[in-house]
Image (cartoon, rainbow, N blue to C red):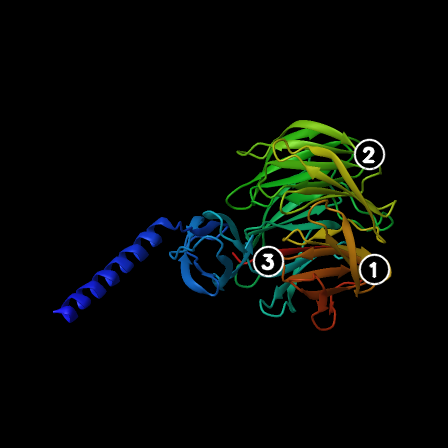
């Protein structure tokens, strides 16, 4: 009998202990780990991992969360398990310790690069090159005829169209063959009043044309008329004028933020940067406001994360960094100045961590962007070709290409952690020498 009661008591203790455990578990909070996915193309999907497991497939833009919850103080680390076909996704705010539901992990996807295009100023052509998606190596695809003296080439971010500006104030639109990269002529327009032409003795810089990051609008500066023309991109790639705004004097540089909400125009003679609101429907510019800068601006560049605007003064060899007011797009009073040994506009990588400048001594200089202030910290120099004149970085941040005016393209892979450039084999010769003036990258469609 005593043994029977002892067994009953042991059983009760076991049950109570189990109940206590369940009660404790119910009282202990648990948190979800998740965030937002953006720019994932339709019909594409990716797999996300938390701490190397808990694989979660995401097939649409918007909020996501992992099915397994975590306890307070638990470490989490979100990584990409499987990339979408033809795309590369990056994770922002990937790790930390859970103190509440985690909702600030950002996953942004970019189309892999497909083709490089080079405008040849004196040979009346645009050259096409196919990009090896693994190595970044270029393979020549052909020359396509243009009008007289093409001085700037841009590709839209959807990878469907290419636009070329000429010294004779015209803009040509082309459609890209998604398989070969061949260019098919679409349309020709006359710009408002003479896009800023590029003569051989005028620093070898392309005219001020910008395609907005959403692929809906094109902006062209007209130095002679002191205006900027806004165009809407149609279904075929043809451009329709949306409006013309007056701006300051001198050569222009145009930049558009990644959401196509604001456009920035730097004017040399006025030593000012104009900020315009972009009409979301047709791309027209409105509500222009001028901000004086303390050095003569030669170009303006926007941090892809939307934190800073960089005003480069080629004459001074300096960069002034201004914080952007997120509510208005205005340049905030806080400014950081950095010295650079370069006279080029510069290119920011898509993560907003590295800034690259071209130098006359056949080199590319890299700088790290300080996250808090936007100041530039020198990292290193890398060899380019003779007379480097234009540079682009693909939207995934994997490859960079430098156009050398003497007749070649230098290709590099970019170290994701340090921003260091590693050459991809020897330079690729262009089909003309002392003629290549502008370079652009088109992603996969």
Could you tell me if residue 82 is visible in this image?
no
Q: Residue at x 67, y 64 (%)?
A: 415
Q: Position of residue 289 (x, y in %)?
A: 70, 27
Observer-nearest of 182 and 47: 47
Q: Position of residue 135 (x, y in %)?
A: 62, 70
CB atoms of marks 3 and 1 within 8 Å: no
Q: Position of residue 167 (x, y in %)?
A: 76, 45
CB atoms of marks 2 and 3 within 8 Å: no
Q: Which residue is mark 2?
A: 271
Mark 3 closeness class: few <14, some 14–19, many ≥20 residues within 10 Å: many
Q: Could you give the CA–CA distance between mark 1 and mark 2, rounded to whole angstroms?
A: 27 Å
Q: Which residue is mark 3?
A: 396
Counting residues from the start of the chain, the first of labels 2 and 3 encountered is 2
Q: Could you give the CA–CA distance between mark 2 and mark 3, rounded to whole angstroms?
A: 33 Å
Residue 388: quarter of image: bottom right
Q: Which residue is mark 1?
A: 387
Q: Position of residue 8 (x, y in %)?
A: 17, 64
Name of the residue lying farthest toward the left = 1
Q: Is residue 141 above or below residue 154?
A: below
């Amino acid at each position: 009998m005593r043994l029977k009661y002892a067994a009953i008591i042991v059983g009760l203790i076991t049950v109570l202990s189990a109940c206590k455990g369940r009660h404790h578990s119910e009282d202990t909070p648990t948190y979800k780990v998740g965030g937002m996915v953006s720019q994932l193309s339709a019909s594409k999907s990716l797999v996300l991992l938390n701490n190397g497991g808990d694989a979660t497939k995401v097939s649409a833009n918007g909020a996501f969360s992992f099915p397994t919850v975590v306890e307070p103080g638990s470490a989490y680390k979100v990584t990409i398990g499987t990339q979408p076909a033809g795309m590369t996704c990056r994770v922002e705010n990937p790790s930390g310790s859970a103190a509440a539901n985690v909702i600030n992990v950002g996953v942004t996807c970019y189309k892999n690069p497909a083709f490089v295009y080079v405008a040849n100023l004196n040979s009346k052509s645009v050259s096409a090159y196919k990009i090896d998606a693994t190595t970044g190596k270029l393979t020549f695809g052909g020359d396509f005829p243009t009008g007289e003296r093409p001085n700037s080439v841009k590709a839209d971010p959807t990878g469907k169209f290419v636009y070329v500006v000429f010294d004779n104030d015209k803009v040509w639109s082309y459609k890209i063959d998604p398989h070969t990269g061949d260019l098919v002529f679409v349309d020709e327009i006359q710009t408002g009043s003479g896009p800023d032409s590029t003569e051989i003795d005028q620093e070898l810089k392309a005219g001020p044309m910008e395609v907005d990051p959403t692929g809906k609008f094109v902006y062209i500066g007209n130095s002679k008329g002191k205006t900027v023309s806004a165009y809407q991109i149609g279904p075929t790639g043809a451009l329709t004028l949306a409006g013309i705004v007056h701006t300051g004097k001198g050569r222009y540089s145009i930049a558009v933020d990644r959401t196509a909400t604001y456009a920035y125009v730097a004017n040399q003679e006025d030593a000012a940067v104009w900020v315009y609101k972009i009409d979301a429907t047709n791309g027209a510019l409105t509500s222009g406001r001028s901000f004086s800068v303390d050095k003569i601006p030669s170009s303006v560049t926007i941090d892809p994360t939307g934190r800073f605007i960089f005003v480069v003064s080629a004459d001074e060899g300096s960069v002034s960094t201004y914080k952007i007011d997120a509510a208005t797009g205005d340049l905030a009073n806080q400014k950081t100045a950095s010295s650079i040994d370069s006279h080029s506009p510069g290119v920011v990588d898509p993560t907003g961590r590295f800034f690259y400048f071209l130098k006359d001594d056949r080199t590319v200089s890299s700088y790290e962007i300080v996250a808090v202030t936007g100041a530039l910290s020198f990292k290193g120099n890398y060899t380019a070709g003779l007379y480097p004149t234009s540079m682009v970085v693909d939207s995934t941040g994997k490859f960079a290409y430098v156009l050398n005016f003497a007749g070649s393209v230098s290709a590099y892979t970019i170290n994701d952690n340090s921003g260091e450039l590693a050459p991809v084999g020897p330079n690729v010769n262009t089909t003309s020498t002392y003629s290549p003036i502008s370079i652009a990258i088109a992603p996969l469609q």
